[in-house]
Image (cartoon, rainbow, N blue to C red):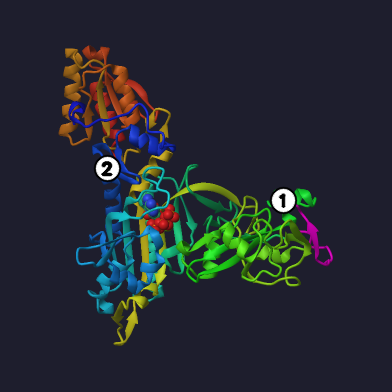
Amino acid sequence: MKASKMLISTLKEAPNEAIIPSHILLLRAGMMKKLVAGVYNYLPLGLRVLNKIERIIREEMDKSGALEILSSAMQPKELWEESGRWKNYGPELIRFKDRHDRDFCLGPTHEEIFTDLVRTTVKSYKNLPLNIYQIQTKYRDEIRPRFGLMRAREFIMKDAYSFDVDEKGLEISYQNMYETYNRIFKRVGLKTRVVLADTGAIGGSASHQFMAISDVGESDIVYCEKCHYAADGEKAESVPTYHRYEEEFKEVEEVTTPNQKTIEEISSFLNVTPKDVVKTLIYVDMDNDELVAALIRGDRFINEIKLVNALGISEAFLRLATEEEINNISVNGFVGPVGLKVKLFVDEEVTMMKNFVVGANKKDAHLINVNYGKDFEGQVVDLRMVQENDECIRCHEPLKIERGIEVGQIFKLGTKYSNSMNCTYLSEEGKTEPMVMGCYGIGVTRTLSAVVEQYHDEHGIIWPKNIAPYHVVVIPIDYKNSEQQILADKIYEQLNNENYEVVLDDRNAKAGFKFKDWDLIGIPYALIVGRKASEGIVELKTRNGNLKEELSLEEALNKIKELLANVR
Ligand code: ATP
Ligand code: MG
């Protein structure tokens, strides 16, 4: 491809809204362009990368025995009602009506569609196990679309669904996908960590996430260096720790605490530590239309996913109560569990505390010397976000936390969808049994941006060669110089004829300008044709800075071929 014919649209600066490197660089390198918030057009260079990621995914999925299909983004409401998710998915689901007033949604995921497809196609155990997948566009009306392709409203996903006769079969299918995912991310070039995950709105019994390690990731990865326990922040557990265990129980007392509302204020006012105070947070369970209270030690943060799970509702149905709602049952800033007339969810650490401080449900008042079991009771659950140095749930070593980008997730669904949607098969014994399902997603466009997060420098993107839009760029310093032109053309034609993916920068522009462009775009290898063209010498440079040498034309071509020999 000749650069003069390409739609190269590099930018000096990215728009202000782009704050993370991948978002900035994908825009600046002209890989994509924003249409509206969370929706992008992929330009030629970006699409080439996307296609290569998809090709790797396809090859590995096909090798795993999965079958590719393609289904529509347009999904009828009836199927979502069968699974119960028309209501449970909440406002992230983009819904619309056709001209006959029939309800539809734009698929955020495809469990319903694939379950329906299989229940109407597969009848017998003889056709199982089955794993079908697609690479297709998904829609989620994310509350905060941001970070470019990371959290978009339209994005490409590879989704796969497995159907087995029993749990044992599911275990094999799940393991197969686990290994396939590891192979995919390795070929793409991503450094990932696999973690235990919450099953969320998709439902099911077990799940893992594939996290690309990155400081800009939106997920916490909690891990133990000793026993290799690793879990997503929403799922991670730690050993509850107790505080002041030796003390005797004391009697509750009310104390005046004028305007002391936050944990910091109250603990310094009463001369105790945040660990001696219990926070009482009021939430609205919108599914059951009631207020609930969550109690946690003052120095801790609540994990809302754990609360959602304790309530048995979907994430979309939980929100913090407003000040007005709180004042209907207590006094905002002074809420406490003693005498509170709502369902209490109590973090297990609170039950291990002694003589602690809580709000008195009265203005400017707190209670001291409160004890769980003696002064109030509730449902005891784990509600904590794990913090660094908490004890590992498996081996008691201090836990570490790093940030990650969730690029894939796999779920053991079991019979959740096959039961609600009646997806059954006839067993060898002639009995009707529900199929046992798994589902497996990869965020294809998110993977693309995660790669940029891991592979860039201050000048631009550094594509790993397996997914680079082109492998080699030939850059004549001055294309109008006839010696340079002849040599550059020759290299270009030779590589082109041998089916290498090569660009010739034939643009009539200053060398510095061209170098800047290619550093930004991130092609792995550059062959620079300059003053020594008359001697048949070129410079070979790798974008990652590992190599920069002057070589004869033949040496340079051989070297390039060697470097590209293992691209796949
Ligand atoms: P998240 O927790 O980041 O919202 P999710 O758990 O809801 O993601 P899944 O339902 O597991 O996502 O979807 C499978 C994959 O699709 C995810 O692992 C992620 O890589 C990708 N994905 C999900 N939501 C988005 C989005 N808004 N933009 C881009 N990719 C996404
Ligand atoms: Mg997920």
Q: Position of residue 434 (x, y in %)?
A: 35, 79
Which residue is at 30% across, 44% downward? 40
Q: CA distance from mark 2 to mark 1?
A: 52 Å
Q: Position of residue 520 (x, y in %)?
A: 34, 29
- The span picked out in magenta is 243-258
- Direction bottom: furthest residue: 430
Describe the element under mark 1 as helix, strand or loop: loop
Specify the quarter for ligand 1.
bottom left
Magenta region, main secondary structure:
loop
Q: Quadrant of residue 63?
A: bottom left
Assess whether residue 257 is covered by the magenta stretch: yes
Mark 1, residue position: 259
Mark 2, residue position: 41
Considering depth in this image, is 27 or 365 the residue closer to the camera?
A: 365
Which residue is at 18% across, 28% downward? 2
User: Relative to 49, does residue 203 appear above or below in the rendering?
Assistant: below
Q: Ligand 1: does it lie within 8 Å of the C-beta at label 1?
A: no
Q: Quadrant of residue 141?
A: bottom left
User: Relative to 537, does residue 381 appear above or below in the rendering?
Assistant: below
In the rendering, which numbered label is found on residue 552?
none
**Badge 1 local density, few (<14 within 10 Å), some, or many (20+)?**
few
Quadrant location, the C terminus: top left
Which residue is at 57% across, 49% downward? 401
Q: Quadrant of residue 360?
A: bottom right
Could you tell which of marks 2 and 1 lies nearer the N-terminus? 2
User: Relative to 465, does residue 72 appear above or below in the rendering?
Assistant: below
Q: Position of residue 440 (x, y in %)?
A: 36, 61
